[in-house]
Image: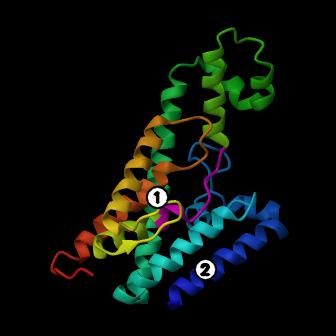
Amino acid sequence: MSPVVKNLLILNLLFFVAQFALPGIMKNLELYPVVSEEFKPWQLATHFFMHSTHGLMHIFFNMFALIMFGTQLERVWGPKKFLTYYLATALGAAFLHLLVGYLRIQNLESSLSPAELNQILTEGFEYLRNSKNYVDPIMGQLNLNLFLLYNTPMIGASGAVFGLLAAYGYLFPNTELYLMFIPVPIKAKYFVMGYAAIELFSGISNNPNDNVAHFAHLGGALVGIIMVIIWQRQKNQFY
């Protein structure tokens, strides 16, 4: 395992354990929407070390991908360049996620009166559960969506990991990957493009029951592919 990847792995595991030991403090490190009272600037630099405590799958797959793809990229770029790339894609993921969330909030707010908006923000779930003043069930769902957009934080290294996938697919396009649930090998470039297409479709679909930050994944991939193209502009070396 390369040195930066190893240190990132250790940091993620330490943060994961700390979420159980210090839940009140660690909650401040999740990334809240910019319009939320819970938003703090430092969350941009801490949220991608946080992972869901409702099971191990979230952190397991992120760390597995970090080791699998990050180690190869760090060996190609070196530690400093790799760390720069990782942090840039994590921030790119956060910014696109925040931007899309802000636009969605603005869109939902435009359909509400100031009184309705104030009631949602002040009374929250209690008001939505009662729904006494809402005859139209669609209107009630809009309010629930808005409240969730205001108060749901984002956590996880998935945006940065998707940036690693984008770089790996660009630099190692014909490397065959053997993936769970897929009985045949698939070239890295096709895997990354297919995965990105699924994320884009899921993000646009905006299913209220979907708790995955799809645009964060796409933000990490977008920043990552731009950086790789710039870095490779004077090179024609692929692997």
Looking at the image, is mark 1 or mark 2 earlier in the sequence? 2
Question: Marks 1/2: CA distance?
Answer: 19 Å
Q: Residue at x 41, y 68 (%)?
A: 165
Closer to the camera, 130 or 239? 239
Q: Nearer the viewer, mark 1 or mark 2?
A: 2
Magenta span main SS: loop
Magenta segment boundaries in residue numbering: 152-161
Q: Is residue 49 visible?
A: no
Label 1 element class: helix
Q: Does 127 sit above or below residue 213? A: above
* Quarter of the image where one finds residue 7: bottom right
Where residue 102 sits in the image (x, y, percent)? 50, 40
Instruction: Give yes or no for residue 155 being in the magenta stretch.
Output: yes
* Quarter of the image where one finds residue 17: bottom right
Q: Residue furthest front?
A: 183
Q: Which residue is mark 1?
A: 93
Residue type at the position of mark 1 = Ala
Q: Which residue is mark 2?
A: 9
Residue type at the position of mark 2 = Leu
Q: Does 10 sit above or below residue 228? A: below
